[in-house]
Amino acid sequence: MGICLDKARAKETLVHHGIPTPEFQAVESPEDIRRSIELPVIVKPLHEGSSKGITQRSFCATWPDVEAEVARVVARYNEPAIVERFLSGREFTVAVLGNDGDVRVLPIVELDYGELPSGVHPVYGFESKWIWDRPEEPLDIFRCPARCTPELQHRIEAIAMAAFRSLRCRDWARIDVRCDEDENPHILEINPLPGVIPDPNENSSYPKAARAAGLTFDDVIHSVLRAAAARYELKVPI
């Protein structure tokens, strides 16, 4: 959890293992920025989850915008910012369940940014999760199973599993993947404790993938418990 919630440490691990992830740099002030990353970029807090600190302002197309957003993030959250190259391709999230020989990838979820309000940047940030997407009016942004070729599906699943293993995730995780302009998948973030809202009427990616695999919410929770118990050679009556 600690490693994955430090976005730079997680990405450094991926780079060490040769797993594609967008070019990035962690900075503590605007003066630290190296203008070596291709614009546009995404600026976000180094830590945090649930899209905290990721808004439409995080999409920066000029270096003055980058400097201003880095300054805002550092001041607001009292932590470094991460500056990451923005990839213009399709975005997916991949639910992984189990360990070792029993691990499996559930049906891939795609984010359809065509469903966002007109004129906004294709970023699944705070506004998308908590403002535009409401229980009484859900944002129809997810497609599961994702509509992709078998070859792309295989590459997405392979890179997600490589990230899961390289960061030593256990029992379950949800891994965010985005493609570049040539449809090459890259790891954005790893969520070792994914959100699991049980209500099918609410947008929660892991349960959505599980339902597409024919699993109920109880099936998922029991599977996670069994996977954890197996690591300790415990028998559980579920």
Image (tube, grey):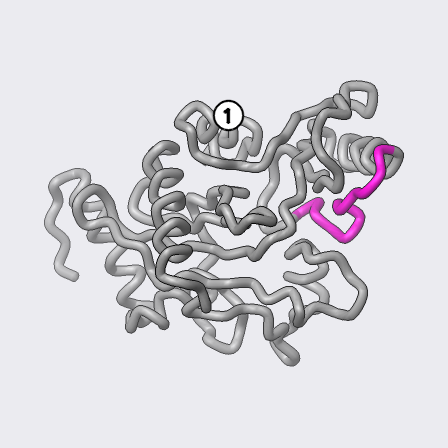
Q: Quadrant of residue 46?
A: top right
Which image quarter holds the N terminus?
top left
Kindly state the secondary structure of the residue where label 1 is placed. helix
Q: Quadrant of residue 210?
A: bottom left
Image label count: 1
Toward the right, the furthest residue is 64
Toward the top, the furthest residue is 32
Q: Position of residue 170 (x, y in %)?
A: 31, 41
Q: Position of residue 96 (x, y in %)?
A: 34, 52
- Give the crowd class for mark 1: few <14, some 14-19, many >=20 residues within 10 Å: some
On the image, numbered disc 1 is attached to which residue? 12
Above or below: residue 51 compared with residue 140: above
Start-end of magenta stretch: 52-63
Q: Amino acid at mark 1?
A: Glu
Q: Is residue 143 magenta?
A: no
Q: Is residue 56 magenta?
A: yes
Tell me what residue is drawn at x 42 percent, y 29 percent: 18
* Relative side of 189 to 116, left or right: left
* Relative side of 131 to 155, left or right: right
Above or below: residue 64 compared with residue 87: above
Q: Nearest the camera: 8 or 52?
A: 8
Above or below: residue 26 compared with residue 136: above
Q: Quadrant of residue 146?
A: bottom left
